Amino acid sequence: MIHESINKIWLLSKKNIFLYIRKGPVLIFGLMFPFFMTLSWVIGREISLNLVFIGIIAMTSFFTATAISPVVLPIETREKSLERILSFPISLNEILLGIILASTLYSLIITSILAIIFMLLFSIMFSSLSLIFLIFLGILFMSVLGSLLGLLISAYPTDMTSDVMILVNLIKFPLLFISGIFIPLNSLSPHLVFLSFISPITFLADLLKFCVDGSNYFMFQFDIIMLLIWIGLLFVVSYTLHKRTLPKRLAETGISKKKKMMIKKNMV
Amino acid sequence: MNIITHRQNLNKESVAIKVLNLSKRFEDLFAVYNASFEILQGEIVGILGPNGAGKTTTIRLLTGVFQLEDNAKIEIFGKDITKNPIKYKKHYGIVPEISNAYSDYSVWQNLKFSGSIYGITKEKIEKRSKKLLTQFDLINRMHSKTKTLSKGLKQRLNLCLALLHKPPILILDEPTSGLDPISMNLMRKQILKLKEEGKTILITTHDMREAQNICDRILIMNNGKIIADQSPKTLREQFKSTSTILIKIEGVLSIEQEKNLSKIVKFVKEKNGYHVITSEDALKDISNLYKASRENNITISEVKIKETSLEEVFIHLIKEDLLNLEEMGNQ
């Protein structure tokens, strides 16, 4: 039973990666955006290599993770393939996990490659192997978390990817700005630090700081717990919202307002 | 297997689908309201209805795409699926009105994905796919991207996808809509062939001729309710009480002849030369007409009785239902 379920999730995620990796919004918001954001942040400023590494990893994992998951359901609604998926012997949980897995793998692979290249190219040093493990654990958590955030926003029952991407960006940028990547948490006032709790990127950036140069604000265990709490919270909210909005995606009754009134009266 | 004999052999124990109190509400609007029906094994049942009648929503409820409301119950081959609808989805093969195969996948990739989801082994998927693609004349397009196929070919692919996991029940949502006459004919032949193979088929259609020709039974839906559940023949029989008689008379009728004839039956002259009579007892009226024509020296050269078509029955029922609604609305 579990084996069957895992197999279905894997098949769905393979399909999602194959079909949506080359879609415009995924390329623009997943690859081009973090690239140009980093360039505009780094060029002309005296920022330490360690901080650039932390910024690049945090932004790339967050942007790539929120690239695939928001577009899958709107595209499948528009192309009617969502109805095919729903008619398969698959649960909503498996459908959502298929999207999360695809988005997580996409983010994890791209960010990990980037992290390895950066570490080798700029000789970023770590005092122990466990710190490198923590970096990749942080990337994995952020990949899952970003995927869930994208999935949550795609619960809005639209078939237009642009509608969802606008919403995603409306949420993504404020979360990025209060996360301590651009302004260190140490230099923020206590109430702004409290505000940074709203952003899950805060805890990834803090975890990366712990690993790279020990300039972390919270304890790394706290960062991990907070990332896990965010993951759990986002999954529960995403699932609940999707369960509620899924019928609306397919609702096409084709009945006029006048006819609706007549039917209502008839039913009373 | 003879279709009529096959139908005669069916009994209550061979119910494939049993639906009770099926309802679906979208906010304050019922798309389907309290629909109950049964479909026997090996039967082709057609759901007819105007746009927005609730046909597609019924199918979506039946196939587990939409969740069932609390008091609804669906049984598949005697087993209540309400508790575990996902498990029973493999009993269905669904052909949608608009192709929902992945357009960026090739024909083969679509079949492979679909088969894998149903847990079929790769070898079996390949074997069955090739057989189905050959049967539906799609084998040459096996590696073509789905988006490059014509509507007719896409619909054939959808049929292959629906049949790949060998489901006992086929659900077709307006499968011939928008197809050219050749593809339409091919699709109808395939549907009848599938019935001969023992599949239970539920089909929604706008095409009355199609429903009349291939369906064993017809459910007419309007405003989310089932307003008729009969065989096409019975439906027509019920409304046969008002048939249309067309007569052609040689020469031109004099005023006197016309007056005498109109005493027997009321008729309307049409431009094509026919006299049209709406009759409640066609045989009696024709007999009286011949009697009157002999007495008045009128030569009737042609008599036609127009059988009530399913389309006329459909329009009549929908109009009746709308009138009822309007009346209730006015109250």
Image (cartoon, rainbow, N blue to C red):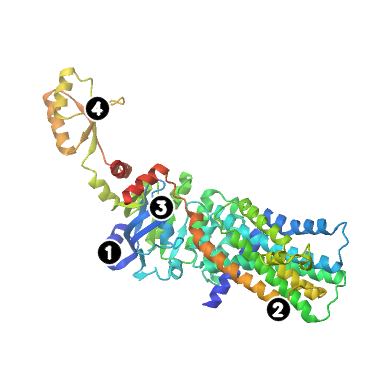
Q: Is residue A87 visible?
A: yes
Q: Mark 3 lies on which chain?
A: B
Type of amino acid under label 3: Asp
| Crowd rating for badge 2 (residues with CA inside 10 Å; few <14, some 14–19, many 20+) | few
Question: Do circles 2 and 4 both sit on a common chain?
Answer: no
Work out whether B50 lies above or below A149: above
**What crowding class fits label 3: few (fewer than 14 Cα within 10 Å), some (14-19), or many (20 or more)?**
few
Residue at 66%, 58% (x, y): give it: A171
**In front of the other: label 2 or label 4?**
2
The chain letter for the residue carrying disc 1 is B
Q: Residue at x 60, y 71 (%)?
A: A232
Residue type at mark 2: give it: Gln
Q: Identify the secondary structure beneath mark 3.
A: loop
Q: Which mark is residue B268?
A: 4
Q: Do the residues labelled 1 and 4 touch (CB within 8 Å)?
A: no
- Locate residue A50: give its quadrant: bottom right
Q: Which residue is drawn at 59% across and 69% down?
A: A233
Q: N-terminal of the two: label 3 or label 1?
A: 1
Residue furthest top in the image: B255
Mark 3 on the same chain as mark 1: yes
Q: In this orientation, which residue lies closer to the viewer: B192 or B51?
A: B51
**Disc 3 marks which residue?**
B28
Spatial separation of the CA atoms under disc 1 and disc 2: 71 Å
- Mark sitting on residue B9: 1
Check whether the beta carbons of the residues at disc 3 and disc 1 lie within 8 A of each other. no
Q: Distance between the residues labelled 4 and 3?
A: 47 Å
Which residue is found at the position 19% from the left and 29% from the top?
A: B266
How far apart marks 3 and 2 lie (CA) works out to 49 Å
- Relative to residue A244, is residue B104 drawn left or right? right
